[in-house]
Image: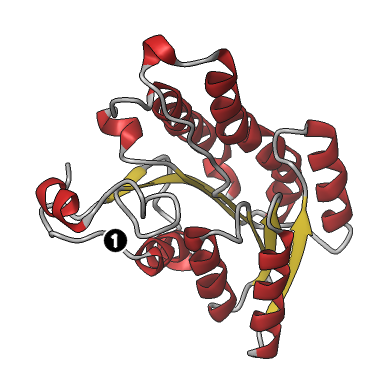
Amino acid sequence: MKRALVTGGSGAIGAAICNRLATDGFHVIIHANGNMEAAQQLATQLCAAGHSAEATRFDVTDASATLAALEKLLESGPIQVVVNNAGIHDDAVFPGMSHEQWSRVIDVSLNGFFNVTQPLTMPMIRTRWGRIITISSVAAITGNRGQVNYSAAKGALHSASKSLALELASRGITVNAVAPGIITSDMTKDVFDADAISKIVPMKRAGKPEEVANLVCFLASDQAAYITGQVISINGGMI
């Protein structure tokens, strides 16, 4: 059974990805930092439904703590699917943005990508099969007022994914980014009302976490073996 790690697995999109990966037959490692209770509850639910799952907790911005947690997980075998879903936003117009707002958003998304993915790469290479999938945002493609930090972090992940895809392509490992638009979640519920969504999104609705999960899990499958180095948008026609 292949093993999959989903960072930020206790949130709306992360939980949907975990559910779908488990249904597809992966052993799912559900990561959380601040909401371990939700991650453990999801793992329990998946196991009760006959799937294979466990929860883990670490701060992706803490390199040493992340490495220690990953080394412990690797004792049970390689992790062949990594979904870098952990991320935060802390919005402000750029002239009023604090250094803390800038660095924290960059730290979670970009440094978190390195801290999680790099230690798992060699064990993955040895299996000659792997999937590295990073959740980005439409903001990384179009930009967004008040999100210079968030757009910068996610945009950097696009470039990192393309470069890493070139390094790992001959090893049977694909590397892609998924860039959602407005998706129903706690992060968006107080930002976009139905009228705003109708004006912004040609499909006139927000996307569902399960729709993002379907795309992610396709990229994690054998059917997507020839797709690598891509940024794939899922945004209802916004761009």
Where does residue 118 sit, x and y in percent of width and height? 70, 37
Q: Which residue occupies the extreme top position in the image?
A: 95
Quadrant into which the N terminus falls: bottom right
Image point (69%, 47%), residue name: 125
Q: Nearer the viewer, residue 193 or 19?
A: 193
Where does residue 38 sit, x and y in percent of width and height? 66, 66
Image point (65%, 54%), residue name: 128
Q: Is residue 212 above or below residue 86?
A: below
Where does residue 192 sit, x and y in percent of width and height? 27, 49
Quadrant into which the C terminus falls: top left
Q: Nearer the viewer, residue 129 or 84?
A: 84
| Residue 210, visible in the rendered structure | yes
Q: In what element is the residue under mark 1?
A: loop
Q: Is residue 231 above or below residue 202?
A: above
| Residue 3, visible in the rendered structure | no
| Residue type for callout 1 | Gly
Q: Is residue 185 left or right of residue 32?
A: left
Q: Is residue 84 left or right of residue 51?
A: left
Q: Which residue is mark 1?
A: 207
The quarter of the displayed image where residue 219 is located: bottom left
Image point (43%, 41%), residue name: 136
Q: Nearer the viewer, residue 97 or 232?
A: 97
Image point (88%, 54%), residue name: 72
The quarter of the displayed image where residue 230 is located: top left
Q: Nearer the viewer, residue 196 or 82?
A: 196
The quarter of the displayed image where residue 99 is located: top right
